[in-house]
Amino acid sequence: MATPTIASVPADPAEQSFDIVARQDVLEAKQKGADAAIATLRTDVDEVKARVDRIARAATRPALAPVSDTPEVKGFVDGYLRRGSTAEIKSISGAVPSDGGYAVPRQIDALIARELTEISPIRAIAQVVQTGSAGYRKLVSTGGTASGWVSETAGRPETDTPRFAEIAPPTGELYANPAASQAMLDDAGFDLEAWLASEIAMEFARAEGAAFVTGTGTNQPEGFLAAPASAAADSIRAFGTLQYVGTGDDAGLGMAPDALLIDLVHTLKAGHRQGASFVMNSATLAQVRKLKTGDGAFLWQPGMVEGQPDRLLGYPVIEAEDMPDIATGAFPIAFGNFRHGYLIAERSATQVLRDPFTNKPFVHFYATKRVGGQVLDSAAIKLLKIEG
């Protein structure tokens, strides 16, 4: 007798379709979970990498205590500037009230100097020397001491007698007078040293900007545009006289300004062109930025890296608002190596006198500093003159 068999019942197509959809949903959920996990892992890895990079950069920097944490600065800021007490600073500064104030600690003086270099255009490119007294003199060789070649046993001919010129930059007392309310000074969270350095630097920079360009030399630096100027070349021009190139147009930059600027660049000796820069104000720069070569390319090139200056004919362009505008007889553009050509001499200590009485309820901080300036090497700076 044969064993009976049970016939399989075919599955419902609707149930099969539902099962397939459910499996797809599960797979998609798993895939999304995996993607989310991978994204989270990548974020964690990036954060760890960034943290490691920050630690590595910090490890390469010297460990410096905060400026306000040093005893010298704390005594000066919390004692003298905030409360007017001189007990904490008499043994630090060595100054006496008859000098017109107290010498600020070197840390705050360094903050002021750093701010000045960033915002004072000529100071940023000129030669700066620190002096211990109000006067400074420098000897500059103007010729002589000839050199040559000889054999090992040959006689040595006499050299020419060296000639020198003395540079004594005219100086003046630069001052600033920022003010703060007593409530600001009483606020422990108010960063007084940073505020004071910034305010003093801003006022100093404004006054310096004009003096280093057009200063008369009377109780202030002598600006480089105050020096005599001549069209004569370096070999026949008197020491201290700057050379200028005329535009050939008494109203503007002439018919071929691109060629004119190239001529200006190459009046400067090759040794000075390394490190040279253009100096002009923003109105002149607006005209120069529109200049093009014969094939339509702009002469002016924007800085491609943050913090790098714009360039004209490959040289940096420094904006100094105290340079004159384009006008008949003016010198709107200077080109040169100002580190070789202009000297700034300053007494290193800035003095501050606290004045809570003149303008109550505000407290003024009368800051002073001796600063001088003069053309150092007249062959290192060239001028462009608007003349027909």
Image: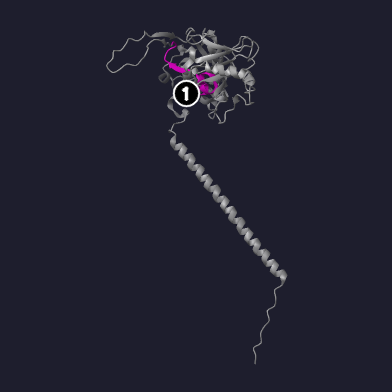
365 over 306 or under it: above or below: above
Few, some or many residues within 10 Å of mark 1 (<14, 14–19, 20+): some
**129 part of magenta stretch:** yes
**327 part of magenta stretch:** no
Count of numbered labels shown in the rendering: 1
Can residue 280 be spotted in the picture?
A: no
Q: Quadrant of residue 132?
A: top left
Horizontal relation, residue 1 to residue 311: left or right: right
Can residue 175 be spotted in the picture?
A: yes
Q: Quadrant of residue 207?
A: top right
Q: Which residues are magenta?
A: 108-135
Q: Residue 208 at x, y = what percent? A: 54, 15
Q: Residue 170 at x, y = what percent? A: 48, 9
In what element is the residue under mark 1?
helix
Between 129 and 285, the one nearer to me in the picture: 285
Horizontal relation, residue 7 to residue 241: left or right: right
Horizontal relation, residue 299 to residue 50: left or right: right
| Residue lying at 58% horizontally and 56% vertically, measured from the top left | 34
Between 279 and 267, the one nearer to me in the picture: 267
Which residue is denoted by mark 1 in the rendering? 110
Between 119 and 68, the one nearer to me in the picture: 119
50 over 347 or under it: above or below: below
Position of the N terminus, as image quadrant, is bottom right
Position of the C terminus, as image quadrant, is top right
Name the residue furthest bottom. 1
Instruction: Identify the amino acid type marked 1.
Output: Ala
| Residue lying at 59% horizontally and 54% vertically, measured from the top left | 35
Q: Residue 329 at x, y = what percent? A: 61, 9
Q: Residue 259 at x, y = what percent? A: 59, 18
Instruction: Report the predominant secondary structure element of the magenta stretch.
Output: helix
